[in-house]
Amino acid sequence: MSGLGRALAFLRSRLLGAVTLPALIGAAWAWRAGAFGAGGAGSGRTGTPALLRLLIALAGLAAVELMNLFGADYVRHLRGRRPAGGRPTAGGRPRAAQGSSLGPVLPGNPVVSPRRLPPAAIPGVLLGLAAAGAAALLYFVLTVGAGVLAFLLPAAAVGALYVFSPFPYAFLATALVPPLVAGGVAFVLLGQAVPGAFLSALPVSLVSAGVILTYQAAYREKRPPALWVRLLAVLLPYVLSDVAVALLLLARLYPRGGFFALLPAVVFPGWAARLLLTVTRDPVPATAVGVFMHSSLSLAIAAGLLLG
């Protein structure tokens, strides 16, 4: 399991599913609202087809996420040159070097091998990605309206809370990313804010909180939590995610196809609980299971919305 878990951790740290999969929820919601039909709401001011608009949104989100990944690689490169933080522990796992992190840093390979992209050249890549993200944002400002800029404030707040950590567990703010992404994608496709699109991704947000708490708190090395605290911290968000799915079904915010979203609840929480009980020092396996739940739940919600 450890080998599989580390492979999944690699996928988590190097792929864009954390952003692009919740975006599919917003796209599915917009599809149900008729954005992709002939002359639908997704054509916008310039008559751009909704599919092209969705691809531009995904490209912009991918650019932002790649900035995070390349930025993390560059910070790791700088720390390697100035080994003041992130020192290996006695068990061989690196400690978190940022004040915003309680637990160990998860393993992950560079986005691009240093043989192909020298770490010192990463700032140039970051500038290119920033330009791509800014171009996508400018496009939507011109075609949808200045209302798109309203999403920048909460996104910046989430980033600031994670980086500067002004209070304990401020890093949990990143769990708000799925609703922001889903609601933002629906907004650029429909031209208006749709509360249902934000709420549709709420279960994914709760799973994100469970994943974050898995490696940030459940496996922290300084004053490790008791076993029951470890289980409660991780499993409670997963259970609340299942409750949120059920409530959204009862409220008919999800169509009948939304029952697909209950399927991940059958497998992953029990799997995560078993790993939390048996693997007490390595955060990768339990984290990987949570990531699997995050991905499968996002896809299940999007599929449920599409199938109706």
Image: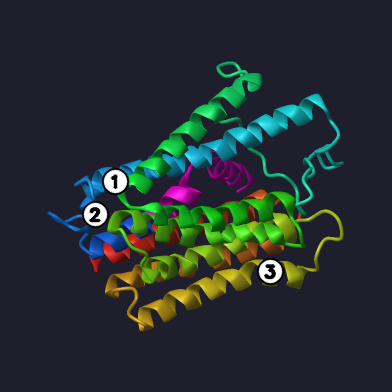
Asked which quadrant contains residue 56, the reply is: top left
Where does label 1 land, which residue? 53
Q: What stretch is highlighted in magenta?
A: 1-23
Q: Where is residue 146 in the image (x, y as percent from the top left)?
A: 40, 53
Q: Quadrant of the rendered structure where residue 31 is? A: bottom left
**Residue 206 image position (x, y, % from top left):** 55, 67
Amino acid under disc 2: Gly
Residue 128 image point, x, y percent: 50, 28
Q: How packed is label 1: few (under 14 Cα within 10 Å), some, or many (20 or more)? A: many
Q: Does the magenta stretch include residue 12?
A: yes
Q: In this view, does 215 lie above or below 308?
A: above
Between disc 2 and disc 3, whose residue precedes? 2
Point 42% across, 79% down: residue: 246
Decide if residue 281 is on the left or right side of residue 306: right
- Identified by mark 3, the residue type is Ala
138 or 250: nearer the viewer: 138
Depth-wise, is mark 1 or mark 3 nearer the camera? 1
Is residue 135 shown above or below 253? above
The residue tagged 3 is 233
Image quarter of residue 194: bottom left
Q: How far apart are marks 1 and 3 (CA)?
A: 39 Å
The residue lying at 65 percent from left, 36 percent from top is 72
Distance in Å between CA atoms under marks 2 and 1: 8 Å
The residue wearing badge 2 is: 42
Secondary structure mostly seen in magenta is helix
* Name of the residue lying farthest toward the left: 38
Q: Residue furthest bottom?
A: 250
Mark 1, secondary structure of its residue: helix
Q: Nearer the viewer, residue 115 or 227?
A: 115
* Residue 37: mark: none
Q: What element carries label 3?
A: helix
